Image (cartoon, rainbow, N blue to C red):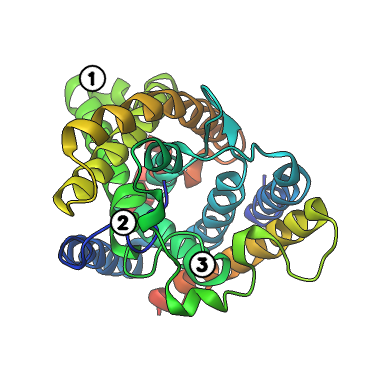
Amino acid sequence: MRMRWFTILALALAIGLATAASPFASASPDGLERVAADKAFLDSGRLANVQEQAPVADYAVPGVGDARVATALAGFAGTLVVFALGWGVATVVRR
Amino acid sequence: MHIPDGFLSPEVAAACAVPAAGAVAYGLRRANRELDERRVPLLGVTAAFVFAAQMLNFPVAGGTSGHFLGAALAAILLGPWLAGLVLSVVLIAQAFVFADGGITALGANVLNMGVVGALVVGGLMVAARKVLGRVGSSRGVLLAVAGAGAWLAVVAGAAATAVELAISGTVPLGTVLPAMLGVHMLIGVGEAAITVAAVSAVLSTRPDVVRAFPVSQGAMA
């Protein structure tokens, strides 16, 4: 398979998963959150100041009424942003 | 396993940030030296896949979920140092864009979810080649290393997290370590399954881009 097609296919899979599957992911606390709740230190966690203005807090695009659509959009956009960042870093450091 | 700000003392956060930054800086140097043209898109795609898969929390026991971390997958595809770099890209985006994982805790998160697991898997790959010779980098052995390494990476990251929380005075080690290990020994099984499936898919389509696979070694020397 040509590298270009491999890249497109793998990126499409990542975007597809982040968009179509993320709204149906488990909403239960993850391992660390569960332990933090059980052992009573969850409340010591807080957002940093810069995170109060995070554009897509909690993986939900703001202003979208349907929670599942908000999550799907966050997955779609986030995967593209991370792909661009990774590609960009790799391109810059190779110079 | 993203640590938010407030869980760690400033001293522990700083003590984690130093080795994390060092590992990422070394990853950048390695990328500069050994990243050939084919691996530039692979680095982007690996980061994108890790981000996407991290969103897919799967249920484990009793109202708890787990999610993919990706350090093992990235280490097998790109080598352990570039894997640390990939995870730092993902974690920086998550912290600043999605408010997931703290800012002062970023170093600890890069260490726990990236560097520690990547080095565990890197060590396993080296050990497999030393003990088994050429067979040590065959497809079968590589998939076994992927599975075992992925599980170990999650458990090691959970242990590191527990130790950092304990040194910070947030929770006693005797309380947090068994709890973190218990739940992440389950989550690690999911990590292993996803890692083996992904490595297997890449080996079937583009084995030459897999850092740990012999046909690509010539390009890496």
The circle drawn on residue A67 is none
The amino acid sitting under disc 1 is Leu
The amino acid sitting under disc 2 is Phe
Sequence-wise, the earlier of marks 1 and 2 is 2
Sequence-wise, the earlier of marks 1 and 3 is 3
In the picture provided, is B10 more to the left or to the right than A45? left
Q: Could you tell me residue B47's position as x and y percent?
A: 52, 56
Given contact means CB atoms under 8 Å apart, are the residues at marks 1 and 2 in contact? no
Residue under the image location 62 percent in, 41 percent down? B56
Residue under the image location 27 percent in, 40 percent down? B122
- Quick check: B207 above or below B135? below
Q: CA distance from mark 2 to mark 3?
A: 20 Å
- To which residue does mark 1 refer? B132
- To which residue does mark 2 refer? B7
- Depth check, front residue: B199 or B13: B13
Instruction: Rate crowding at label 3 as few (under 14), some (14 to 19) or many (20 or more) other CA atoms within 10 Å.
Output: many
Question: Could you say which quadrant of the image residue A35 lies in?
Answer: top left
Sequence-wise, the earlier of marks 2 and 3 is 2
The circle drawn on residue B93 is 3
Q: Nearer the viewer, mark 2 or mark 3?
A: 2
Helix, strand or loop at mark 2:
loop
- Depth check, front residue: B100 or B116: B100
Q: Chain of mark 3?
A: B
Q: Could you tell me residue A49's position as x and y percent?
A: 45, 79
User: Are the residues under marks 1 and 3 on the same chain?
Assistant: yes
In the picture provided, is B3 more to the left or to the right than A60? left
The quarter of the picture where the N terminus of chain A appears is: top right
Q: Residue furthest right?
A: A65
